[in-house]
Image (cartoon, rainbow, N blue to C red):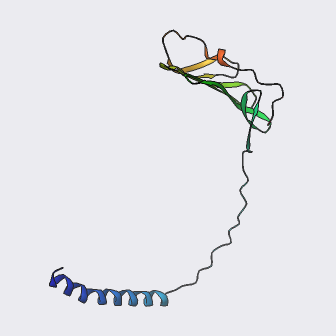
Amino acid sequence: MTHFKVLFLLVCLPLASAAVVKKSAVQQRKFVSVSAPAIRVTPVRPTTTAFKSCTVGGLRLVTQVGAVRSATHGISYPDNRLRVVQTYDRAGRLSSISVNWSGFAGQIVNARASYNPSGRLIKETGYRHKGFPTPLKSYLKQLPKGAKC
């Protein structure tokens, strides 16, 4: 550091600290008491209930309030992997399905489909390898009767 910078710091630092002390003393004298209106705080209640997860008959189920919301199943071999996720609405109707199937040569199917409440296909997106036109609904597994976690 040059002598000029050191001299500047020695002169300015005491002046800056004195200004801060004076300002805080002035602020303390101008303190005004203001009473705020009472605020009523109501506890927040959760709008959703907890999800529960379990495995029933080879299906991994996620339930909410006793209704199945999703089911996951699949097969895994050293050179082949199939994973299917079925999701349901609150009434227990199929709302979507996701299929991810890969083999030793790469992706075979990676597709998702959405269904309306009556069960008709709304939209299907994703990738299918040439020669795999199987409808995604064929990958569905039936939910066990009265399945709950």
In the picture, the quarter occupied by the C terminus is top right
Q: Is residue 21 above or below residue 53?
A: below
Q: In this orientation, which residue lies closer to the viewer: 67 or 22?
A: 67
**Occupied quadrant, residue 99:** top right
Q: Is residue 41 above or below residue 101?
A: below
Q: Residue furthest top?
A: 131
Q: Residue at x 79, y 39 (%)?
A: 65
Q: Furthest-right residue in view?
A: 146
Residue at 66% over, 26% down: 95
> Taking the image as drawn, is residue 98 in sight?
no
The percent coordinates of residue 55 (x first, y second) are: 75, 33
- 35 lies left or right of 102: right
Q: Work out which quarter of the rendered image holds the N terminus and state it.
A: bottom left
Q: Disc count in the image?
A: 0
Q: Residue at x 65, y 18 (%)?
A: 139
Residue 84 in sight? yes
- The image quadrant that residue 41 belongs to is bottom right
Question: Picture coordinates of residue 38 (x, y %)?
Answer: 68, 72
Name the side, left or right, on which 7 lies relative to 56: left
Name the spot of residue 85 as percent of width and height, x first.
Answer: 64, 27
Please give the name of the residue rendered at 70% of the width and 23% of the height, measured from the top-left corner. Answer: 117
| Most distant residue in the front direction | 78
62 left or right, relative to 131: right
Q: Position of residue 102 (x, y in %)?
A: 53, 22
